[in-house]
Every structure is written in structure tokens, then in C-alpha cells.
Image: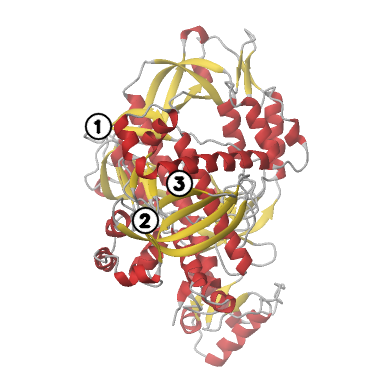
Amino acid sequence: MQSGRYGGSGGRSFRAAAPKAYQVPSAAKTLEEKQIVAALERCSGEDGVPSKSLMREAGIADKAAFYDALHRLEEVGELKVDDQHWVKLLPRDGDLEATLVSLSERFGFARPKNGTEDIFIPGSALNGAFLGDEVVLTGLQARDKGPSGKVKRIVKKSEAKLTGTVHLERAGGGHATPDGALRYDLAIAAGDLHGAKEGDKVLLEPRQDGRGEWTRAVVKAVFGSGDVARVCADAIIERCGIPTEFPPEVLREAEAVGDMAVTQEDIDSRLDLRDEPIFTIDSADAKDLDDAISVHKTIDGYTLGVHIADVSHYVKAGSALDKEAFRRGTSVYFADRVIPMLPEALSNGVCSLNAGTEKLTFSCLMDFDKDGHMTDYRFEKAVIVSKVRGVYKEVNQIFAGTASPDLVEKYSPVAESLQGARELADILKANGRARGQMDLTSDETKFVLDENGVCIDVVPRTSGESEEMIEQLMIAANCAAAKAALKAEIPFLYRVHEKPQPDRVVELYELLDRLGIPCREIKRGNPSTKDFAAVLDRVKDGPRGPLVNQRILRTMEKARYYHRELGHFGLALGEYSHFTSPIRRYPDTSIHRILSDLVAGASKQELTKRYKTFAQESAAESSKNEVRAVTGERAAEDCYMAEYMRAHLGERHVGVISGVTPKGIFVKLQNNAEGFVALSDFENCDFQFDGEIAHKDLRSGRVLMMGQEIGIVVAAADVATGRIDFMPQEDWA
């Protein structure tokens, strides 16, 4: 019998009836009621407190009096008692549940769980809360600069790790400059340094002082010098809570699975595609090959096969492997390492679609007419043999007609399939443009490291024709998976990308309009994807193209996983999911599990019972873990970029102003390095900030405007924080 996130509650179940709206308790609240509320405020966590423990904590000996008081408090909506007798305080009218997301010496900001605007919390109203704590806010008030409130109680203490950089003091001891959103230094006593040296990156345990304020810290572990990006990456992994070590039971399961070979029983029970012209295309250094393709031209159009590693065949629901994959959610990619979602025995072994070996796949077979419209699709458990281990760079050479005879010979077994894939992808890409699909690009950078792991070069990642081809074919399979789930009306995970918020669109329009970039399409109250695409097309070949691309990206909502289909705004699609990467993404594995049961003949009722809760929990956890991974990856990239730029101090470059603040400007170079130029570094200038996109020198009339080119000199690079500083070239001095 399945339980937990795979079916059923798997734990304490809660009453279906919602609690009554809060009513102000009468002044005649009994002593027992006051004791219960006080006890819950002291010790209630996210899940509450068992009633027996609460009675002891409240100091109430009379069992009948305790339960009478408990029921009265529940009736007025002040607390909730679930079916397992766990008791939890409820927010009162006007109170708000939130998480403390930023903390400075004299104030903090809390982000409400309902996603509304961050709440300003004065230092005197933090009530002992620390960064990351889940809290209940009260006394909410409107201010000109945004809402404010105070912490009523801490619901759950943060389990997040705190890292920082140590700085020693002559008198002994030192202080730590924390990483992340803790924006003040913490004092460290000499006896609490535990061997940390000047500039070391360390793991910290924050401590309260005599006034209850978080001003001190103890060093719990030393990673090494903060001048080394690899060491900073170690600290970032710890701070973000990214799991790195697989538990022994997971490794044991992985070894057993890794020894499994494709059997005759597997072949007899599956669609046999071993003779098909199937091949993979990936980067030269990729080892986890989870997708392969095949294309046949037909009388009516094309038949596309997208063959995905059958991870869910090996990773069974509820197994140690599955629980660990759920906990990780995704593989995480750093310049010097990959932290895989699955052990290598699976990710690089039994699941990887290595050429020349029999592999089990979950294949999506799609028919398209000559105009690229999908006319049919089906999902099949299959067995394949990839004929060629394709490499993007090589395929791009073949498409460009510059491939060597040896390369042409290598791809000859799949030449027709490759040509058909190219033709179909071109049609699908044109259809995407016709729908209005946005051609957004992200500033991805490849970091080149030496044998010691030090960054010695940075290269902006580019996408060639073969990369775009594979992307189009994977999009088609992802759409088919979403279509199948919607048609069957079963629980599922969708990749959703909602429309941007109207206020963000207005801000974008005003910014682009001031920059002189035609953007009349988005001035309308409800711009479509095609409207944004038109603005991008208008500037894509000009110097401001990257800036506009960046600003539109910031305007968009973040894509996420969800258990209901909300459409994908960026791709201009009404249905979309993630089916094609189960080796490195848990939501894809989840989708495979659901579709596998659908293909096996499970009814709608069975699938709903089995996967309704699972789909919701997997979508939520996968979204959370994706944010964790991206946060860690970006923070590490900043450190590697600073490490590279530190070796180029004094160099002169021309960059583009990418941001403007009251104190200076950000300048982005062609290699994607972004540095800050302080206004104080411009000699003999008297700048006036327009509050949005430009500074004007009142003496010379010169303007520093977003999107404008400017010459800079690399002035400083701090690896520990990832900060890069530039100076203006002499003609601006």
C-alpha cells in the first residue's frame, strides 16, 4: 500500500472543514486559555504541538479543564486541532504568515506566504527573529515606501546554513561578513574562531547577545581561503543546503540497479526500436545522455521519435533512490563539478543512452503534417540502440558543410534521420515565431578552469543550429505529454509560465520608452507574447538588444512546476510540461511514472487516487529545489567571474551600462562580467540622477544612460563576495 507523497496522507491527516474566521476573544478568557495560548507561542512549530505535550507545557494538571479550554479556543478560531490531536495557533484577522528574507542591523524585510509585497520590520519589532525564520506578523500598516509590521511570534526557526568571510582584529578575535541576505557583520570571540585565518570562508553559527539581538557568531567549520572560487563554491553549496553525499542505502540500491542488463523479457514486453536510426546529440563532455531522437519523412509529413531514458523503470516509487531524488529535485551544475540528482551508476550508467548498447526508453512518437502541425502522438515503453553519439559542435559543422570526411562518415548511419530532424525543427521554429514565441536568451557563461580549478578564461555560451534543433524537438515531446494528461484528465505536473504582472509591464514600457526604443505593442493593457517578441525582434541586431532582452526577462514571471495547467507564456503554448530529462529533473521522473501507469492501462480513477497528492507535492518541491539550485549556481558563477577578472586588473574594456543606481552604474562587458562604477570615481562631475535610467553631469552635460557604451578599467575583484569594481577611463575623469 502506498503512502506519503505516493498516495494517501502518509502522516497526520487534517480535518476537511476549514477553521472558523477569527473572532476577538471575550475579555473573560480563562486562566487555562491564557496558559494554552502562551505555551503555543513559546513552543509551537510549523506543525503545532501534540495536545498531551501542550497540556504539560501549559502547566495544566486538570485534563477536563485543559480540553474544555482547548475546544473553546478552537471554536473562536484562535487555534486548530487536527485529527491526530496536534494543536496549532492560527493567525488572527489582520495577521500575516511570512518568512524573514533580509536582515540588516536596524531592520528586516519579511515576504508574505501569499506572495504580496515584502513587509518592512523595524529592528525593535523583530522579536528575536533571524534570517529565514517563518513568522507571524501583526500590526500591519501602510507606508509611503511600502507596508510595515512587527513579528508577533516565530512559527519555525530557519534550518538554513550561514556562511561568511572572516576578518581578524589586532586585539584578538574578529568579525565575519556573512554571505547572502544578512547585511551586517557578526562579532567572533577569539576562542570561537576555531583556526579560521584572515579571509577564510567559514560556516557560522549565529548567536544572540545579552539584549537578544543577533550580533555574534561562532565558526563551526573552515572551508579555506575566500580568494579561491572553488572554496567559495563549497561554502555556497553548504549555505544553499544542496545535498552532495548520497546515503549508503541509496548507493546500495544504485549499485544493484546499475548491474541490471536489458533482458529478453524487457525486449518482448516493449516496442522494439533497436533497428531504428536513433541517435543522441549533446555536448562533448556530457555523460548523462537522457534523450535520443529519430525522424522519418512520410508522405504526409514527418514522424518524430523522442526517446527518453526510462528512469522510472529503475527508480521505483518509495525506494531510497526515489526519496533521495525527490529531496534533491535536480542536478546542480558548477564550473568545476556536477552534483547529480541520481548516483553515477544510473545517471552515467544504466540510464544513459550510450551509443551501441541496448537501452530502455519511454518513447514519445509523434506525427506531423508538412506544415508542422502535430496530428497524432503516443507514448510507448521501448528498447533502443543509439547508432551515433552525436556532438553539437560536430553536427553544426555538418549543417554548415564544413565537416571533415571522417565526421560525415560517423553520422552516415543516421544521415536521413538527421536531415529530417533538421527540416522538421525548422518548420516547428517557424511555427513558434508565428505564434509569437519570444526569442529570449540568457547570459550563460562557460568557465574554463586550469588543473588547479582556477578560472583562467570565460566564454559566453552560444547556441548553434543543432542546439536549436534539439530544443524544438524536445518542446514537441513536452507538449505531447501535457496533451496526453489533459486528454486523460489525470493528475500531472505542468511547466507553467504565467503572464507578467501589469505593473511590471508598465515599468518596462516606461523604461523602454525613455530609452527611445519603440514598444507601442506593450503599452496595451494586456500584451501578448507576440507583442513582446515584436519588441525583441526590433532591437536584436542593435547594441541595445542584450539590454532589452535582460529587461524583458526581469519583467516575466518565473517558470515553475504546478499541478494544474496554466499555459506557458514565453513559448506561447496552452499546454506544456517537462518530459525529456528524468536523469537530472525529478518532475520529469514524476511525469514518467504517471504516464507509465496510464500507458499500462490504469483508469482515471486509479490514477487520481494514486497521484493526486503526489503531483501537488512533487510540483511544489521541484519548484523549490529548482530555485535552490539556480541560486547556488548563480552565486558560484559570480565568484568564478571575480576570480577570472582579478587576473586582469588594470585592463581597459568597453562595456554597456546595464543598470543605474543613485550611487553609480553597472557596466557589463562582452564576456558577461558585470562591475560597478561609483559616481565618486568620475572626477570633476556633479551628477543628477533621474531616478530611473540615467545620471546627468550638470557641469558638462554628459549623460550616463542605461544601454550606453562606456570605457572602463578593471579596478578590483573580490572572489569571496563575487563583486567586481570598475573605474571610468580617463576621458571620463
Q: Is residue 579 above or below residue 105?
A: below
User: Image check: 381 left or right of 202?
Assistant: right
- Reading the image, the residue beneath label 1 is 450
Label 2 SS: loop
CA gap, disc 2 and disc 3: 39 Å
Q: Say which amino acid is labelled 2.
A: Asp
Q: Position of residue 90 (x, y in %)?
A: 61, 70
Query: Can you identify the residue that label 2 sits on?
Result: 275
Q: Is residue 280 visible?
A: yes
Q: Residue furthest right?
A: 524
Residue extending farthest to the front is 299
Q: Image point 69% across, 39% down: which residue?
A: 530
Report how far apart the C-alphas of labels 3 and 1 lie in the structure.
Answer: 24 Å
Residue marked by disc 3: 630
Q: Earlier in the sequence, mark 3 or mark 1?
A: 1
Residue 552 vs 92, above or below: the answer is above
Q: Residue 528: x and y, percent? A: 71, 42
Q: Is residue 633 left or right of residue 524?
A: left
In the image, 96: left or right of 12?
right
Q: What's the residue type where badge 3 is placed?
A: Val
Along the line of sight, the residue nearer the viewer: 219 or 602: 602
Number of other residues with Cα within 10 Å of mark 1, as a class: few under 14, some 14 to 19, many 20 or more: few
Instruction: Indicate the position of residue 472 as horizontal and vertical percent values.
Output: 53, 44
The image quadrant of residue 346 is bottom left
Label whose residue precedes the other's in the sequence (2 or 1): 2
Position in image of residue 691 (x %, y %): 66, 27
Towards the viewer: 312 or 718: 312
